[in-house]
Image (spheres, rainbow, N blue to C red):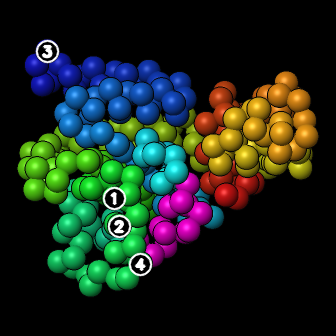
Amino acid sequence: MNYLGKIDNYIRDVDAAQNIEEVCVAVRTHIEPQGFERFTYALLISPHGPVNKPLYISTYPSEWANRYVQQKYASRDLIMRFVATTLRPFLWDEVSEHAEITKVQHQIFNEASDFNILSGGSVPIHGPGAVKASFAVASSLPEPEFARLFLAQRHELHLVATYAHERMLDIGLIKDPRLSFKLTPREVDVLTWTACGKTAWEISEILSLSEDTVREYIKNACRALNTNNKTHAIAVALVNGLIII
């Protein structure tokens, strides 16, 4: 299949996606054969204003993704700051040309390398309106090799990121804060542990519930948040401040 045919297929798959997981599958199916092993989408400012905390949808190792969120690295990550100030795709190594690398930034890079994330690049997304987001790709490739790959495909990655971002918003990732959501305390507990990567069985042990009861709480939470799967429910709950991890 030629280049334009692959792009058309990607756009078709994203447009047809009915939930966040299907958008992620479309992105992963397109970029993995090109050499980009991991990606993260981060929503920084929603159509309704700044979010309580950046929302991450990631294919990074869960241990690293959870640590990044739990340590609140986004607020101290120079890469995320640079995303807010530029419109062009950039390599992470380029950030040192614009700002002095801090001790925390060195720590972030070192910890990421422990999970075989050795190189990466980001695509800033600005719009519609004041919305800001980031799409990042990462790899276990050495930096020089990754740089050649990223620079050769940065314009295509920009297109991939833009279509995925727009579809995320269309699906209803961010709800109008004027709409009220209500979760019971137990639904909050279950959804929070789910967001931390726990299985239904593990949550049942933690909360002294049956697995079936845990699954029922998850279904109820999805219904209350007007979502059709737990990944979407977690995203909506996080960005609207209903759960904190």
Instruction: Tell me which corner region of the image, top left, top right, bottom left or bottom right, holds residue 95.
Output: bottom left
Q: In this rendering, which labeled residue sits more in front, label 4 or label 3?
A: 4
**Crowding near pointer 1: few (<14 within 10 Å), some, many (20+)?**
some
Q: Name the mark nearer the viewer: 2 or 4.
A: 2
Q: Which mark is residue 2?
A: none
Q: Residue at x 45, y 75 (%)?
A: 76
User: Total label count?
Assistant: 4
Please provide the residue range marked out in magenta.
66-77
Disc 2: which residue: 110
Quick check: 147 above or below 5?
below
Q: What secondary structure characterizes most of the magenta part?
A: helix
Q: Which residue lies at the image location 27% right of the left edge and 56% below the top edge?
A: 118
Q: Are marks 3 and 1 in contact (CB under 8 Å)?
A: no
Q: CA distance from mark 4 to mark 3?
A: 44 Å
Tell me residue 52's x, y (percent).
63, 64
The residue positioned 77% from the left and 32% from the top of the image is 201
Q: Position of residue 240 (x, y in %)?
A: 68, 54
Comes first in the chain, label 4 or label 1: 4
Q: Nearer the viewer, residue 91 or 103?
A: 103
Question: Does residue 194 appear to the left or right of 35 in the view shown?
Answer: right
Q: Earlier in the sequence, mark 2 or mark 4?
A: 4
Picture coordinates of residue 43, whole percent (x, y) = 48, 54
Badges 2 and 4: C-beta atoms under 8 Å apart? no
Residue on which the image places disc 1:
113
Mark 4 is on which residue type? Answer: Val
Counting residues from the start of the chain, the first of labels 3 and 1 encountered is 3
Residue 123, can we see it?
A: no
Can residue 144 be seen in this snapshot?
A: yes
Q: Which residue is mark 3?
A: 1
Question: Could you tell me which secondary element the residue under label 2 belongs to?
Answer: helix
Name the kind of residue labelled 1 in the image: Ser
Find disc 4 in the rendering and name its residue: 104
